[in-house]
Amino acid sequence: MKKNKSIGILCAILSAVCYGTNPFGALPLYEEGVNTATVLAHRFGLAVIMLAIVMLIKRENFKVTRHEFKVLFSLGILFAASSITYYQSFHFMDAGIASTILFVYPVMVAVIMASFFKERVTAMTIVAIVMSLVGIVLLYKGETGASLSAVGIVLCVLSSLAYAIYIVVVNQSSIKMSSFKVTFYAMLVCELTLILYSFTSPELYLHVLPSPRAWSFAVWLSIVPTILSLVFMTVAVNHVGATPTAILGALEPLTAVTIGVVVFGELLTPRLIVGILFILFAVMLVVLGKDFHLRTITHAVSRLWHWR
């Protein structure tokens, strides 16, 4: 695969924006009384079915080698672990604090890549990471004095670490297959893991979604913040690398804040504006790297249909 940085940057941005739309699907489902295990199981189960249909339409081979299965199995376990620990942290702390702590994963990716794969961490990368983290902290709108649970913090850190390793594995694996196929098998293992996890507690039982409205939000979750986000992320990592993709993930909470302001009428405060500017500055540091040219964006869009 010939790498193209403009494609990687564009896909990383699209991945982050897609993932940032999670509130559109998750919050209405919780309002209807659907538990966490059921939300996640339907999200990933529907994603597996849709990805299988796409692969059949594209006439892709479902066969994988033993080595490929090991990598794909690892990806599924990592994503399941990240999802479970993240959603469980909501029982111990405010969701806003949890989402803020989660975004230490760019730092983890940079450290892993530098420590184990000898990737050079430039001053620009460090500045971009710091700026994105500061911006994300500024976006947090929790109540003053909100308590920090040690258990909640541990769960968030474990979730962040699992997702960081997921990105690194995608970046370092030698398997050659389409992004759809990678995501299909990762989500299949993830779904099976979540089903097994649902047996660990009476509160995590799986049940059928209660209404057509709930099904529509489950479909949204499976398509936009799952299939599209992970496919774009896989393409981005293969083209631009793990660390830049992770840094651009700062657009995820920014997207959530934008949705809150534009769709739900939340107040745009000076603090939010400063946080948005910090994140946009971090993103620009990644986008305007010495090897990247803005005039190639149009060409990148025209080539996205390949997704290899």
Image (cartoon, grey):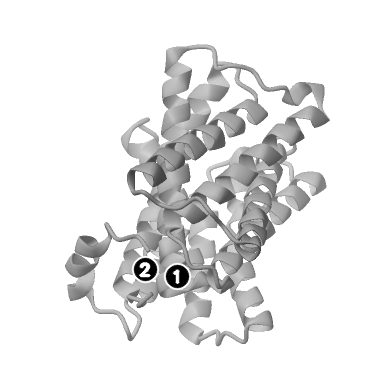
**Dividing the image into 4 quarters, which one contains the C terminus?**
bottom left
Counting from the top left corner in percent of width and height, residue 7 is at: 31, 68
The quarter holding residue 67 reads bottom right
Residue 87 versus residue 250 in the image, above or below: above
Instruction: Identify the disc placed on residue 49.
Output: none
Counting from the top left corner in percent of width and height, residue 220 is at: 41, 32
Residue 92 visible somewhere in the drawing: yes
Q: Nearer the viewer, residue 272 or 57?
A: 57
- Between the C-alphas of marks 1 and 2, the distance is 7 Å
> Which numbered mark, 1 or 2, is in the foreground of this view?
1
Identify the residue under disc 1: 238
Counting from the top left corner in percent of width and height, residue 12 is at: 40, 61
Tell whether 288 sits left or right of 74: left
Q: Residue at 73% x, 42% y: name it.
A: 147
Query: What amino acid is labelled 1 in the image?
Result: Asn
Identify the residue under disc 2: 8
Label pair 1/2, CB-CB below 8 angstroms: yes
Q: What element carries label 2?
A: helix
Residue 96 versus residue 29 in the image, above or below: below
Residue 216 versus residue 12 in the image, above or below: above
Q: Residues within 10 Å of mark 1 (few under 14, many from 20)?
A: many
Q: Residue at 64% x, 18% y: name it.
A: 207
The quarter holding residue 227 reads top left
Q: What element carries label 1?
A: helix
Residue 271 versus residue 35 in the image, above or below: below
Q: How crowded is mark 2: few (under 14 residues within 10 Å), some or many (20 or more)?
A: many
Q: Residue at 47% x, 74% y: name it.
A: 241
Q: Nearer the viewer, residue 36 or 275?
A: 36
Tell whether 211 sits left or right of 299: right
Query: What amino acid is labelled 2 in the image?
Result: Gly
Give the residue furthest to the top: 211
Residue 256 visible somewhere in the drawing: no
